Image (tube, helix red, strand yellow):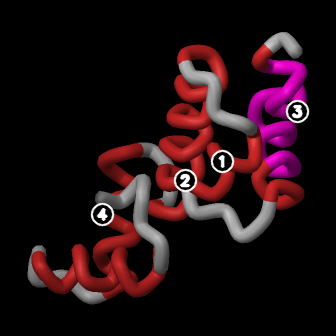
Amino acid sequence: ELAHASAPRERLERIARAHGLGWERFRKVFARRVGCSPGAYRVRCRIDRARELLLHSDLSVAAIAADLGYASVTSFTAQFRALVGNPPGRFRGR
């Protein structure tokens, strides 16, 4: 659920409340247990899913960006390049 949240802050706050925690406490507990903030974890999950789709599907980069909830191909490509080191098309090998 966390990795695919379309409204990340609201969804995270709902998860925190479901566990009886306020936002700040949830963020601290999450970071201590997972090793990064909830937002960073969500980004990492989205990029991991993008890698899978790029390697094992014929979906376009635009379709992958949309499926993962990015507002634009440009923002998806920038984040992918920052974390992976190459843009999505080059990562795919095309």
Q: Nearer the viewer, mark 1 or mark 4?
A: 1
Q: Nearer the viewer, mark 3 or mark 4?
A: 3
Amino acid tagged 1: Ala
Q: CA distance from mark 4 to mark 2?
A: 29 Å
Magenta region, residue range: 77-91
Residue 57's quadrant in the figure?
Answer: top right
Residue identified by numbered label 3: 87
Query: Which one is earlier in the sequence, the residue at label 3 or at label 4?
Result: 4
Say if 89 sits above or below 80 in the image. Answer: above
> Disc 1 marks which residue?
63
Closest to the camera, between mark 3 and mark 1, is 1
User: Is disc 4 surrounded by few (<14), some (14 to 19) or many (20+) residues within 10 Å?
Assistant: some
* Most common secondary structure along the magenta stretch: helix
Badge number at residue 30: none
Q: Amino acid at mark 4?
A: Val
Circle count: 4
Q: What number is the disc on residue 67? A: 2
Q: Are marks 2 and 1 in contact (CB under 8 Å)?
A: yes
- Among the two numbered marks 4 and 2 on one chain, the one whose residue lies closer to the N terminus: 4
Q: Secondary structure at mark 2?
A: helix
Residue 2, located in which quarter of the rendered image? bottom left
Q: Position of residue 27 (x, y in %)?
A: 39, 71
Density class for disc 3 (Cα within 10 Å; few <14, some 14-19, many ≥20) is some
The mark closer to the camera, 3 or 2, is 2
The residue under the point 35% across, 85% down is 23
Mark nearer the N terminus (3 vs 1): 1
Quadrant in the picture for the C terminus: top right
Give the mark, 1 or 4, whose residue is nearer the N terminus: 4
Determine which residue is flagged by label 4: 29
